[in-house]
Structure formats: C-alpha cells, structure tokens
Image: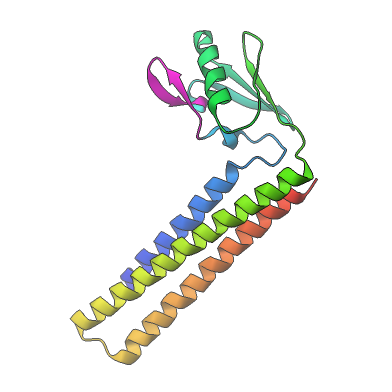
C-alpha cells in the first residue's frame, strides 16, 4: 500500500514540475532563453528546437542573441520566431538574430499574473484528480486485501495530507512567479 501512495505522490510531483516548466516559458521583461524552449525551426524539413540549430546567449538583461551554426537557416529561425507567440519581432543582421524584450506595461503584467493563476488552478485540479485516483485505488486494493475500515481511513488521510502539501507548493510557485512578474 505504501508503494501505491509513493506512485501517486510522484505523479503530483510531476504536475508541480510541469507547472514550473510552464512558468519558465513566461517572459517577465527580462531575457530568459527558456522562452524559446517550445519554438521549433524547420531544419531541412525536420522540426528542430532552436537550441539545437545554433548558439543562444543572453548578452544583456533584456536581449537574447541566436547565432545559427548553419547561416543558411537564418531565415527559417526568423520565420519560426515571427510565427511563435513571443510577441517580439526578431532583428536579423545576416549573421545572427537579436530578440530585444521591451519593458512590460502594468496592464500586460496583470494579464500575465491572471495567466499564471489560471495555470496554477490547472495544476491544482491535476493534483486533486490524482488524489481522487489514489483514493479509488486504495479502496480497491483495500477490498482485495481485506484491509479494515480504520486502516482505509488512515490511508485516505495520508493521501489528503500529501494533496494539501502539493496544493501549498503550487500556491507558493504561483505566488513567487506573480511577484516576479509584478516587480518592475
């Protein structure tokens, strides 16, 4: 039964890690190369992550520079950046591409915080769904193994404690990212 609880706790940890990965792609007015993680470049017919076709660096606080190893795909990288949801127009000088991140307006910051809270709620829903699955699995296993009602209640209490712990972690992650966005 303990390994069953561990399995569900690992699933909750994965939900939290996924939320943190999503947060790393939200741009906060400072250049963060992780905003490029989901952008794919058509590299000779194959969708390839930007990090795999060139050097990505952050020379200044609000600028990312992408220097493709193969200069012939510069236009493809630029096309992928324009098509993405970054909202930044790339500057191409023939050798490399610059992305300059403008300061975020107060209105845009508030929109981002709403988006962060929505993603946080989604993560909490995922954690609660895992809790429901865990309780169902414990009840099923309990019936199969003939575990007493009191022991079943204890296991359900343990599942609830783990769930509460992960909901607090999600709330803390949302709070941290919201504060980071709202800090000018």
* Visible residue check, residue 165: yes
The residue sitting at 29% across, 72% down in the picture is 137
The answer to whether residue 166 is above or below residue 26 is below
The residue sitting at 51% across, 25% down in the picture is 50
Residue 21 point in image, percent of width and height? 53, 46
Residue 41 point in image, percent of width and height? 47, 22
The residue sitting at 55% across, 13% down in the picture is 74
In the shown orientation, is residue 46 left or right of residue 94?
left
**Residue most extreme to the left:** 144
The answer to whether residue 173 is above or below residue 109 is below
Quadrant of image for the N terminus: bottom left
Q: Is residue 46 inside the magenta stretch?
A: yes
Residue 116 point in image, percent of width and height? 61, 52
Dominant secondary structure of the residues highlighted in magenta in the image: strand
Residue 62 point in image, percent of width and height? 73, 31
Residue interval drawn in magenta: 38-50
The answer to whether residue 115 is above or below residue 2 is above
Q: Is residue 137 inside the magenta stretch?
A: no
């Amino acid at each position: 039964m303990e390994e069953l609880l561990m399995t569900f706790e690992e699933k909750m940890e994965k939900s939290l890690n996924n939320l943190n990965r999503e947060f790393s792609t939200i741009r906060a007015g400072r250049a963060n190369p992780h905003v490029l993680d989901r952008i794919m470049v058509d590299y000779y017919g194959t969708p390839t992550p930007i990090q795999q076709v060139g050097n990505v660096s952050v020379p200044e606080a609000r600028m990312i520079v992408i220097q493709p190893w193969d200069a012939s795909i510069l236009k493809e990288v630029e096309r992928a950046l324009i098509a993405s949801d970054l909202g930044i127009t790339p500057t191409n000088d023939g050798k490399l591409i610059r992305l300059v991140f403008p300061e975020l307006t107060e209105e845009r910051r508030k929109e981002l915080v709403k988006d962060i809270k929505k993603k946080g709620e989604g993560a909490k829903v995922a954690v609660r769904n895992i809790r429901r699955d865990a309780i169902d699995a414990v009840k099923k296993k309990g019936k199969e193994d003939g575990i007493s009602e009191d022991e079943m209640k204890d296991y359900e209490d343990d599942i609830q404690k783990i769930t509460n712990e992960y909901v607090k972690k999600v709330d803390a992650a949302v709070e941290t990212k919201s504060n980071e966005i709202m800090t000018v």
